[in-house]
Image (tube, grey):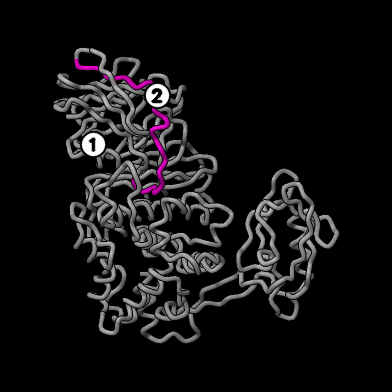
Amino acid sequence: MITYTIAMPEPHTHLYHVEVVVDAVSAPCLNLVLPAWTPGSYMIREFARHIQEFTAHGPDGTELPWRKTAKDTWQIDADQAPGVVVRYKVYANELTVRTSHLDSRHGYFNPANVCMYVPDRTNEQLAVTVAVPEGWQVNTALEAGVGGQGDGEESSFTFIAQDYDELVDSPFECGTQRVLTFSVDAVPHEIVIWGRGNEDEARLIADTRRIVEVQRDMFGGLPYPHYCFILHLTDGRGGGLEHRNSVTNMVDRWTFRPDQSYERYLSLTSHELFHVWNVKRLRPAPLGPFDYRSENYTRLLWFAEGVTCYYDKLLLVRAGLMRHERYLEKLADEILSLQSQPGRHLQSLEESSFDAWVKYYRPDENSANTSISYYLKGTLVCLALDMEIRRRTGGSCSLDGVLRDLYGRYPMNGPGIPENGGVLAVVEELAGAQDGFFRDFFARYIAGTAEIDYTSALATVGLELRWSHRQPGENGVAPAWLGIKFKRQGERTLVASVRSDSPAYAAGIYADDELLAMDGWRANQDWLNARLTERVPGDTVRLSLFRNDLLIEVSVVLGEAPYDNLIIVPVATPVAAQQRAYREWLG
């Protein structure tokens, strides 16, 4: 067995002290590798950069020669040594859900950042002992092993992982965190909270339990023996990362009031828990077994994340934790957001999924012009797909049923959903393939860049879209539009981004240009926006700008502003089929 000991004797140094004991070494050389990324966060992050003070010894303490053979690989001369003991330290001072953090208040680590693996022994059972300062506890989704003790200064806790994949999928929270507990179907759940804010513990338990229950009802049971919600309450940070039997969520500590702010916690919790089924068990074929050293490409992240985003708030409605009206407001915001991105004409959902490794986590000022989020557009395509399945089957089937079928067809230990046509095949099997409608749907909206037909989709459940301008121009005409987003940098007003379908882009205004004046008058963002309300489309304005400290002037012919307001409302006279579909959709 390969065993890990992870200690933190001096938390203020941000250094985890790691020992890896590898038994039964038979080859003359032993390679140890640290992952370059962590599942669920699709970007190469080079965790090996935080490794320091690496040493290798035999069981008797004899020092063994070693060398680095790649950025992430340490090779040890282990000839004639029955086992190898490796020690190193990991610098951990990055507080995100995908990295590791250690200070005097707590220790949090993702094993992908900390635990090296032996490439040809990732399927073996592993033991992990975590040694923490006296008074600290350890929470993780791994099964507790035999052992654990305290000596007055340090306590240790041992856990067992069935293989390296399970270890990587089990983050650890160490410290004096609060632990709230509840059960669903006799399955224990923990909410492990680091930090404090305006949370209501009783409400957290009740609402989280309700989220678990409604997702259990959708899939017909809970697939795990126990579950651990790790919740970090911080100042302004956010994020979530799903794991097999656990999750790490990070929210602003004051996010729990008022109710519209509390929705962020509920939606995040619903989203990451849904991944227990969709991604952690039902997964695209390339996402497991993993290659931890390089990219694992898939064109199905739109399904992995888009489906999950579609259901995270929808299931809150079914659980009674979000009003129907509020859900429609959120849906309208998502449609409005996608329609404001010119990149929807250039990048398909499949391309966005495939390019996640180089695009999604590295946005720049041009991202909205050239790309889309597989989360956002994936949500809206799944909405349209769900509506079409309901409409074409008369309500006898829905995307719910497609998911359940896929979940049963592609178990966790199976090959995963085929990249080419796996989802489409089940949709056609359940909803009909006779006229090629769904094949065309996938070609247009998932492989292609066609505009989503929201009107037709929402008509299925008796809803319609009403577009407008928040501040309409005089006599009902569209207001004048530049197409610039600004940012503040001290006292300076800089161009943050320019929409590629805007008058400013056509006139040659760049990101990072500094706004000085309009038509000779000193300008900042608020002043400029106020003056634009006095203009009409077709007017010309003269902008004075600094570009790399050079004063320039650019004339811009103002255009008609695109709609920036959307509401979704019931049609005036819904028919019985629409009313029934609406009830079945939102529960």
Does the magenta segment cover residue 180? Answer: no
As drawn, 174 above or below 351: above
Taking the spot 28% from the left edge, 62% from the top edge, the residue there is 419
Instruction: Kindly indicate whether the residue at mark 2 contacts the one at mark 1 (C-beta within 8 angstroms).
Output: no
Residue 560, x across and y down, in percent: 68, 74
| Residue 319 in the image, given as x and y percentages of width and height | 37, 61
Q: Determine the CA span between mark 1 and mark 2.
A: 21 Å
Residue 50 shown in magenta? yes
Q: Residue at x 28, y 54 (%)?
A: 286
Mark 1 lies on residue: 119
Q: Nearer the viewer, residue 233 or 280?
A: 280
Decide which of 258, 463 is in the foreground and name it.
463
Report the amino acid beneath label 2. Answer: Gln
Q: Where are the magenta residues, as a range?
A: 39-59
Q: Quadrant of the C terminus?
A: bottom left
Please state the horizontal and vertical placement of residue 355, each as a whole percent of the image.
42, 56
Q: Work out whether residue 152 or residue 531 is closer to the camera in this orientation and state it.
A: 531
- Direction from residue 546 to residue 55 in the image, left or right: left
Q: What residue is disc 2 on? A: 52
Q: Quadrant of the N terminus?
A: top left
Please, is residue 578 above or below residue 135 in the view?
below
Give the answer, above or below, for where 103 lies relative to 44.
above
Q: Position of residue 18 (x, y in %)?
A: 32, 24
What crowding class fits label 1: few (fewer than 14 Cα within 10 Å), some (14-19), or many (20 or more)? some
Q: Secondary structure at mark 1?
A: helix
How would you rate the neighbour count of disc 2 (Cα within 10 Å): few for under 14, some for 14-19, many for 20 or more? some
Query: Which residue sits at x=27%, y=72%?
Result: 427
